[in-house]
Amino acid sequence: MRLLRLWPDESHFDFMRFRRVTFPLSAVMSVVTLVLFITVGLNYGIDFKGGTLVELQAKAGQKADVAEIRHTANGFGFGETEVQELGGEGQVLVRFPLQAGEQGQTAVMQKAHAAFDAGYDFRRTETVGPRVSGELVQSGTIGVVLSVLAVLLYLWFRFERELALGAIVGTLHDIVLTVGVFIITRIEFNMTSIAAILTIVGYSLNETVVVFDRTRELMRRYKTIPVVELLNLSINSTMSRTVMTSLSTTLSLVALVLFGGEAIKGFAVVMLCGVVICTYSAIFVSTPALIYIGLRLSGAKASQRESGLPQAAE
């Protein structure tokens, strides 16, 4: 029985012709993300900001009134309160600002119960103090930085200099655009978000290594093929695997987004965007970057060749 192929084995699609569009586009998106990060910032969750989070569920036969909840919560005198309607009918998430001392947090819960017990059930309550949130910020930042540095160090020793630089460009591109997803969608950035970023770094590394391994293999096999043609051949020869991996991962993440519940919905949405970003990056960013970095083959220069057909080295 013939195996399923989502991409033809003998394809000769010219991916590199899009580099004059995708490279400037990725550069613009990266710059815009950095500007938004400085000006708008992330929507930090209770893990990093501290405070009290309460998830309310309207009782049977009632509908959650977000405006009324916000007005009532702001009237407690604890500062500006964030109220967000969740996916489920009648579900509301209320975030109270950080209060000084344990008595302040206790006062928040006492007033919340007094105001909302009649019409809502308290499904979840989380309280994070300033010391804990500060430690989480520090630990999370150190963890991400060390993980990214370890990945970049691995890429540097894993490949030749030009290939390593291309892989590093792609990995940093994926991290920046993933942060951009958090900024644009305003998905809460918490400890789960750090797990999502590290997972995306691993996925990006996997996609890049597969393509670049084939590139290195073809560099040893074909000594005089033009660099652009070599890179197109590398992508086309791994495209079936790339499509299959991306599609299977996407289907799993779509299921999590639709049926996984609110607790992991943010994580699943970011991961879904991350898979798209990493797949796009491996084909249209990190691989074309080799052309601009100056990848050279050990045979004759590409400019001296007239034929576009690869020939095996003797």
Image (cartoon, helix red, strand yellow):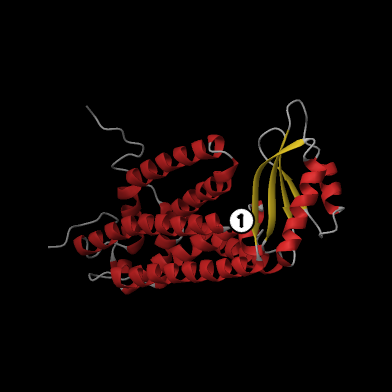
Side of 182 where 215 appears, left or right:
left
| Relative to 198, residue 294 above or below | below
Q: Amino acid at mark 1?
A: Phe
| Relative to 272, residue 63 above or below | above
At 51% across and 39% down in the image, what residue appears?
256
Q: Nearer the viewer, residue 77 or 181?
A: 77
Q: Nearer the viewer, residue 22 or 138?
A: 138
Q: Nearer the viewer, residue 33 or 266?
A: 266
Side of 175 where 31 appears, left or right:
right
| Relative to 80, residue 300 above or below | below
Side of 32 where 306 appears, left or right:
left
Image quarter where the N terminus lies is top left
Residue with the mark numbered 1: 182
Image quarter where the C terminus lies is bottom left
| Residue 109 image position (x, y, % from top left) | 74, 51
At 45% across and 39% down in the image, what residue appears?
252
| Residue 10 image position (x, y, % from top left) | 29, 42
Q: Nearer the viewer, residue 109 or 272?
A: 109
| Quarter location, residue 131 | bottom right
| Quarter location, residue 65 | top right
At 42% across and 40% down in the image, what residue appears?
247
User: Considering the numbered disc 1 on the image, is that residue within a helix, a strand or a loop?
Assistant: helix
Residue 159 seen in the figure: no
Side of 312 where 163 appears, left or right:
right
Residue 62 seen in the figure: yes
Q: Residues within 10 Å of mark 1 (few under 14, many from 20)?
A: many
| Residue 130 image position (x, y, % from top left) | 66, 68
Q: Residue furthest left?
A: 314
| Residue 249 image position (x, y, % from top left) | 42, 43
Count of numbered badges drawn on the protein: 1
